[in-house]
Image (cartoon, helix red, strand yellow):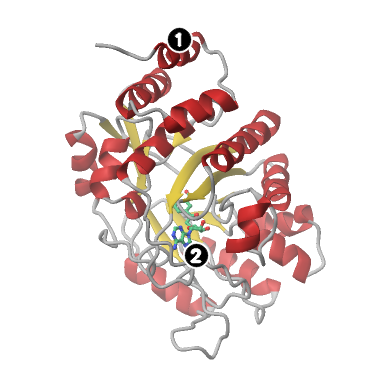
Amino acid sequence: MNIDPKLREIADKVEAGVRLGTDDGMLLSTHTDLLTVGQIANMARECRHGNITYYNRNLHLNTTNVCEANCAFCSFARLKEDMPSAYTMSTEQALEWIEKRYRPGMTEVHIVNGLNPHLPFSYYTDLLRAIGTRFPALHLKAFSAVEIHYFAQKFGMSYRQTLEQLIDAGLGSLPGGGAEIFANRVRKQICRDKVDADGWLDVHRTAHQLGLKSNCTMLYGTMETREERIDHLLRLRELQDETGGFQAFVPLAYHAEGNRLQIFSKPTADDDLRMIAVSRLLLDNIPHIKAYWIMLGLKMAQIAQRFGANDMDGTVIEEKVYHMAGAETPHELTIDELRRMIRAMGREPSERTTMYEPVM
Ligand code: V47
């Protein structure tokens, strides 16, 4: 089999533990031999995780979709609380919502919301306290860096003070949402009301300094260039060198339904698999690369387990952000289905907690 010597060189670097740079990232992002790119990423993945693919038993909760930020790619948010389908749950309603969907063995609730201008800070601390009290087995992975920045600004606190109060109320870790793409050129067009890249990174830096773990993401397939994708990944890697607090990277493919961005050249299969592979290879210091099945589709999330990914996310249950943007995946998977999908790819399913501890 003929392998381009340039890819061979990258494979040799990866095997020798030599860090890849921007040029390597660009070559991996553009080379027509996607299978070899995937094979190199698979080698890096197997070196770290062998044959294991992780999953967890989780639940997604969005207690309000009222949001001041008018992001062009978002189908979930409603700008005003009197708009049709705008909603805000009370703490009691949120508890009832979980109660109906709670299953024994569930270990995590993933909470993200709109930037709702009508809620006091106590809404968020009360919510965490109430869920923590009623469902002590659930780890509270809550509020994207965009929300933390919004709380800090709105309620006149530093990131540290905001996070300290949330930790005191039971916050366990931060999800990776809201990073979008760090390039200011794109941010100005797709999410100009949101915290900028430095602010997003600074929230995570502060969280890591306070001992919280977090995830990170990148939204791809809007109007970013390949160079901007590489720049995004390298900025995450730089912060990880400093703090070591990121657990997982989750690439997120743009979905076009129900939002005004209306870019219909959806990310292709090549884009999806290449994103997984390139992130595995460039993010040599972030342990887990998650193929989020809700967003990628079940089959692509399976193949991704051979292109560098080692995590599938979990049972999820009633996902909104992607389903409102046209995702055709089911709303939830049972543990048996998740495990079957992982085994069908020749991988060994391993249930984990949010902190990647094994669940026996
Ligand atoms: O922040 C919103 C993205 C994110 C669209 O941390 C869209 O483990 C594509 O962050 N097309 C929310 N993307 C989801 C998220 C996430 C998901 C799973 C696991 C984790 C984790 C985090 O989804 C948003 C935004 O970046 N998004 N709308 C859309 N139309």
Pinpoint residue 263: horizontal percent, then vertical percent: 43, 62
Q: Tell me: 170 left or right of 1.
A: right
Residue at disc 2, CB closer than 8 Å to ligand 1: yes
Q: Tell me: 46 left or right of 64.
A: left
Pinpoint residue 184: horizontal percent, then vertical percent: 67, 52
Q: Nearer the viewer, residue 270 or 16?
A: 270
Q: How crowded is mark 2: few (under 14 residues within 10 Å), some or many (20 or more)?
A: many
* Rendered image: mark on residue 73: 2
Pinpoint residue 283: horizontal percent, then vertical percent: 53, 30
Q: What residue do we see at 37% from left, 48% from top?
A: 292
What residue is shown with label 1? Answer: 12
Q: What residue do we see at 59% from left, 27% from top?
A: 22
Q: Earlier in the sequence, mark 1 or mark 2?
A: 1
Q: Nearer the viewer, residue 233 or 319?
A: 233
Q: Residues within 10 Å of mark 1 (few under 14, many from 20)?
A: few
Q: What residue do we see at 37% from left, 19% from top?
A: 43
Q: How far apart are marks 1 and 2 (CA)?
A: 39 Å
Q: Nearer the viewer, residue 258 or 29?
A: 29
